[in-house]
């Protein structure tokens, strides 16, 4: 099984400089970055390190996923964002989960042996929203073991599964749509517990309220279309 590591970046110079040497590059057979138009030196830093960049004319995380599968040679792709939230040591574990039979492996931020970055906050609003959307996805679409983190973008997915999903969501909705459609098709999901750390520099581009409305719209659409995708 040929493995591809894909870095997703947008102005992550602080994160990538802090994490670059911790990324287990040898866990994959090939690696490249899909950059959404960084202007802070991220692209130049990775170029100096010999990491191939794939251009992304249309912005958005959903488009980045689709571009990655077009460019990759691997049978399984692992997506990693070097913003500080994601622990690079989990990359081999996500690949291992796929090798163990998963069609989709997700780094789980909730439940046993895991941590969400908002766990120490009195009002972890984003974590609550995540769990609510996760509960709805399990209730409506899942016929297997309960999936505790349907939204986290830190994941690995096989090419064969991705081709069946026909994902067309834009932005951060792509991961939720992907998980829901894996559930609909009865494909196998394995979750790997992860410790989510604080973001290193920069700002998240996922505003809570607009992102929540997009997720709600995406959920309603998946209810209506069923398996017609």
Image: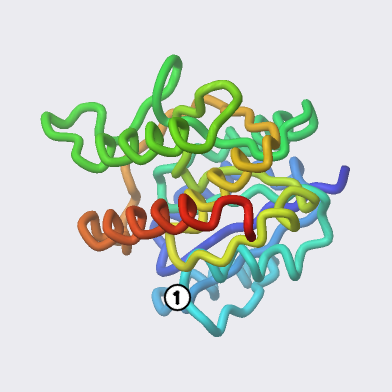
Residue drawn at (53%, 45%) of the image? 180
Q: Residue furthest right?
A: 1
State the residue in front, 202 or 133: 133
Q: Tag 1's secondary structure? A: loop
Q: Kindly tell me whether residue 88 is visible in this rendering.
A: yes
State the residue in front, 96 or 148: 148
Q: Name the residue under label 1.
A: 38
Residue drawn at (72%, 57%) of the image? 31
Q: Position of residue 109 (x, y in %)?
A: 42, 31
100 relative to 55, above or below: above
In which quadrant of the rendered view does residue 23 lie? top right
Residue drawn at (44%, 65%) of the image? 171
Quadrant into which the N terminus falls: top right
Residue drawn at (53%, 57%) of the image? 225
> Viewed as shown, does residue 206 lie left or right of 99?
left
Q: Position of residue 212 (x, y in %)?
A: 28, 54
76 relative to 191, above or below: below
Q: Position of residue 152 (x, y in %)?
A: 46, 43
């Amino acid at each position: 099984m040929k493995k591809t590591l894909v870095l997703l970046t947008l102005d992550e110079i602080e994160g990538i400089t802090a994490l670059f040497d911790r990324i287990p590059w040898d866990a994959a057979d090939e690696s490249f970055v899909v950059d959404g138009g960084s202007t802070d030196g991220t692209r130049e830093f990775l170029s100096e390190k010999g990491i191939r960049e794939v251009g992304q004319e249309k912005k958005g995380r959903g488009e980045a996923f689709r571009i990655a599968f077009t460019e990759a040679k691997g049978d399984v792709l692992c997506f990693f964002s070097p913003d500080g939230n994601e622990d690079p040591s989990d990359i081999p574990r996500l690949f291992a989960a796929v090798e163990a039979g998963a069609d989709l492996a997700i780094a789980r931020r909730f439940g046993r042996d895991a941590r969400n970055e908002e766990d120490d906050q009195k009002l972890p609003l984003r974590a609550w929203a995540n769990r609510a959307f996760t509960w709805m996805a399990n209730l409506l679409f899942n016929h297997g073991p309960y999936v505790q983190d349907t939204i986290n973008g830190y994941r690995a997915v096989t090419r064969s599964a991705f081709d069946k999903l026909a994902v067309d969501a834009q932005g951060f909705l792509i991961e939720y749509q992907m998980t829901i459609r894996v559930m609909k098709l009865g494909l196998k999901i394995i979750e790997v517990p992860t410790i989510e750390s604080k973001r290193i520099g920069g700002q998240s581009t996922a505003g809570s309220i607009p992102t929540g409305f997009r997720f709600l719209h995406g959920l309603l659409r998946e209810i209506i279309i069923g398996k017609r995708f």
